[in-house]
Amino acid sequence: MALTQDEMKQEVAKAAIEYVEAGTIIGVGTGSTANCFIDELAKIKGKIEGTVASSVASADRLKAHGIPVFELNDVNGLSVYVDGADESTHHLHLVKGGGGALTREKIVAAASKKFVCIADESKLVDRLGKFPLPVEVIPMARSLVAREIIKQIGGQPVLREGFTTDNGNIILDIHELDILDPIEVETTLNMITGVVTNGLFAKRPADILLLGTQNGVKTLS
Ligand code: 5RP
């Protein structure tokens, strides 16, 4: 019988437990796949010192399981970061931020020695951009940033209505992009005044992608 998308998410979450080093503090991402990972982590919580979460929602879920959650400023570094993605290429360049947690996700990934991305096979693409690219923006810069995006990289920036990030900012989702050079687009967006960060993880891609497929979990690196 064919596996559902949820079953594939659970399989990759289980597989990611192999990358958790005993006695360390690990970074934990945000979203439905990361939630599956948190639930798996609860089963081995005695083996780790604790976690740093990339969102308030994930911190709440971790705490509900009795897993210690630290502030990033209070720890020296993280052994591994485990998180989902909205899109990944075979080069492990990612689009993230569907859940709006992109900035904290980028920070926690940057603080981690290894980034293990977990996703079902629907997320693997040849080229990034079909999933609208999230950009976190300081609220007063919304119109300025939207105009600059159209001028500098194209696409259609759309305000994510009724959404505020954990950092108190807004999200512009850029539709109709075909991202040929993810590193260049990531850099160009970051240079626009008023942009906090964008959902491209290309300068710091994942190190490992655990992909849930109908034929089991595939490891790409
Ligand atoms: C949240 C993210 C998530 O990792 C991404 O949206 C994937 O979510 P899901 O596992 O629910 O498909 O970047 O900001």
Image: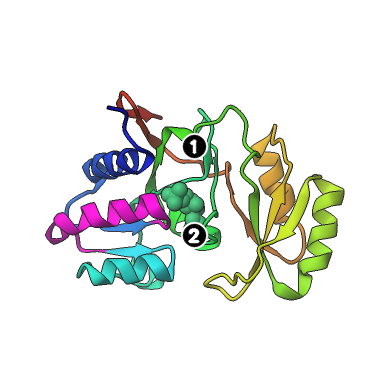
Q: Amino acid at mark 2?
A: Ile
Disc on res. 107: 2
Callout in the foreground (1, 2): 1
Earlier in the chain: of badge 1 and badge 2, it is: 2
* Residue farthest toward the top in the current orientation of the protein: 215
Q: The N terminus appears in which quarter of the rendering?
A: top left
Q: Quadrant of the C terminus?
A: top left
Residue found at x 52% / y 72%: 166
> Which residue is painted at 24% across and 56% down in the image?
39
Mark 2: secondary structure:
helix
Q: Vertically, is 76 above or below 201? A: below
Of residue 30 and residue 188, the one placed in the foreground of this image is: 30
Is residue 147 highlighted in magenta?
no
Whether residue 68 appears in this view of the structure is no
At 33% across and 38% down in the image, what residue appears? Answer: 8
Q: Is residue 41 magenta?
A: yes
Instruction: Give, as a single range, the part of the protein colored magenta.
Output: 29-50
Query: For this view, does 168 lie left or right of residue 172?
Result: left
Tell me: 185 left or right of 74. right
Using the rendered view, name the quadrant where residue 136 is placed. Answer: bottom right
Q: Residue at x 75, y 54 (%)?
A: 157
As measured in the structure, the alpha-carbon distance from the residue carrying label 1 to the one carrying label 2 is 22 Å
* Rendered location of residue 135, percent (x, y): 66, 57
Image location (x, y in percent) of residue 114? 37, 45
x and y percentages locating residue 167 in the rendered image:
56, 73
Q: Is mark 1 within 8 Å of ligand 1?
A: yes
